[in-house]
Image: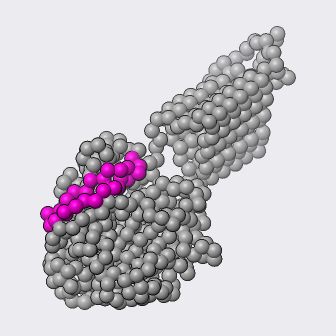
Amino acid sequence: MPALKFGSVTPSALHFGGAPVSKVYLGATEIWPLAAGATLTADAGTFTLTGVNAAFLRALRMVADPGAFTLTGNAVTFPGAYAFNAETGTFTLTGNAAGLLRALRMEAASGAFSLTGNAAGLSKTFTVLAEGGAFTLTGVDAAFKRALVMQAATGSFTLTGNAATLTYTPVGSNYALAYRTTDLTSVGTGGSVVGLDTEVADIPGFHSTASDTERFTVTSTFNTRYGRFSGSSRSATEDTEVYCRKNGSTFNGVARQVGRSAGTQNLRVASGIIALATSDYFDMVARDLSGTVTFSGGDFTWGQLEVLPSDFNGCLAYKAATQSLSASTTTALEFDSEVYDLDGFHSTASNTSRQTVPASGVSLIRISGCIETASITAGNQFVLGALKGGASFNGAPNLDVEIGVTGADYLNCMSGPLEVSGSDYFELTAFGPAQTLPASPYSWFQVEELPSDLKWARARLASNFSLSAATTTNIQWDTEDADVGGWIDLGTNNTRLTVPSGVTKIRIVANLQAASSTNQLVVSMTKNGASFPGMGSFDNETAGVDSVNAWSAILDVTPGDYFEITAFSTNARSLTGGTTTWATIEEVRF
């Protein structure tokens, strides 16, 4: 049998390698590289390899713009150290025993990778990355094994098989969500830590249902990363509050919320984003302001710790000095100190009320904040709002409280995604009785950058929307401010925010404003028409204009899941169309 030279072709053999090789071929098609570094490159080219035993062996690199690679056979394998890169290319591997083995990296801009076989497997240290690409693994025994990283901006990953497995911890689920199923009784003015006995998600191992169930503890994997704690509670009629803690204490960026209602009282908190350290733990405390009350178990009572992406960008400023407020005057809140400022959003020397978007590089943000007031006489309203460039804006968070007990009020707010341009600036505002606001770890202003290509949407009321008395109503949105990805269909289902393809995790934020009326106003949300663990809700009862602001936990979803925002008012009245009655839904990435 004559020796094969590099690149030679016979009816039964293909050879790419660094040295000659002799072999008897019996109907099999093989690639035999005897030295590393064989490269297949195509500029609109096509590579096809077909045989009973078709194989690429050792250190191949395949690159296509926009080429296609096809490998078909009864025993089809790529056994060693390959990089697949496609701009608009297609890679297809089909066989009874189709396998990609050892240290593969597959990347696609808009390419597609398909692996199909009775025993289809990806084994040992794979990285699969897609920006519009699609990866499909199909087989009776389909498996991804050992240390996989799978990331997609608009890509799609599909694993199908009778024994389909992902082994070892996947990257990309950096949060825990747990809730309480039983009532927490006899909660007094000293407060009670809220234990959470059931987990919805906890891939990082932050939470335990066996001990210290109130805690979310940072693991060493996330040391020095940035994170946020959020939570929610429901209680019987009463003046109540909830707040979060780190290691049993307050911290700059800690969240607290008070509320009063003639009906069931729903409260929620979300802290500022802070640097995490191994073994830090977060929990939530519920408290009655004047007596004792029962906090209910169920979907409304939950806690969550999330870790932000490793490229997190933002600023957390807080109030370390006092500030005077005039009576019934909307005033920008000043924040004279910073926990951090990663991109020049804030100044402690001038315009300390502002979080300003950098001149370039930032196009989508979220703002959030919290305020502690001075002691306010029972029955006085206090309002926390937001301005952009000194004016109201679509998607502005806004809420108010009116407590029946004299003491400090605490208000906590969050926006959804906000489209911005360089030099846009945002402020938090206060409106209430004359007072001197204290320096406080509960008084802070957060801005966080969101990915510019994030899938998200905001629905809004431009016109007033009538609410019947004592009736829970799905809000019928009339305006679509933004819809990146296809979440909203005002013509068919104008109450719904529906998860599009390619989205696996979401967060919802909602804000309602209603005409002045006594008694209760409630904002809440449902998933596929029902309550769910991690749902957000907030209600108040004030003599003036009512504003309520709520958010969900991060939730795992599937395409087609839909969410609706509900409103409940004791009295018949209208939700106010304009800038402050809206809902956002956004994909969450890690």
Is 238 left or right of 417, judged from the image as shown?
A: left
Q: Residue at x 56, y 50 (%)?
A: 152
Magenta includes 186? yes
Residue sticking out furthest to the right: 11
| Residue 585 spot, x, y in % from top left | 49, 66
Q: Toward the viewer: 439 or 249?
A: 249
Taking 511 as reference, is 147 above or below it? above
Q: Toward the viewer: 524 or 103?
A: 524
Residue sticking out furthest to the top: 1
Is 341 left or right of 319, judged from the image as shown?
A: right
Q: Residue at x 48, y 59 (%)?
A: 506
Taking 90 as reference, is 431 above or below it? below
Taking 312 as reference, is 477 above or below it? below
Q: Residue at x 23, y 71 (%)?
A: 240
Taking 435 as reference, is 73 above or below it? above
Q: Toward the viewer: 410 or 386?
A: 410
Residues in magenta, as a range: 177-202
Is 130 left or right of 172, judged from the image as shown?
A: right
How many numbered circles are shown? 0
For the N terminus, give its image quadrant: top right
| Residue 204 spot, x, y in % from top left | 38, 44
| Residue 279 spot, x, y in % from top left | 25, 44
Magenta includes 229? no
Is residue 423 in view from this perspective? no
Is residue 89 in view from this perspective? yes
Q: How is the image coloured?
A: one colour
Q: Quadrant of residue 49?
A: top right
Q: Residue at x 35, y 72 (%)?
A: 538
Q: Toward the viewer: 459 or 102?
A: 459
| Residue 361 spot, x, y in % from top left | 47, 63
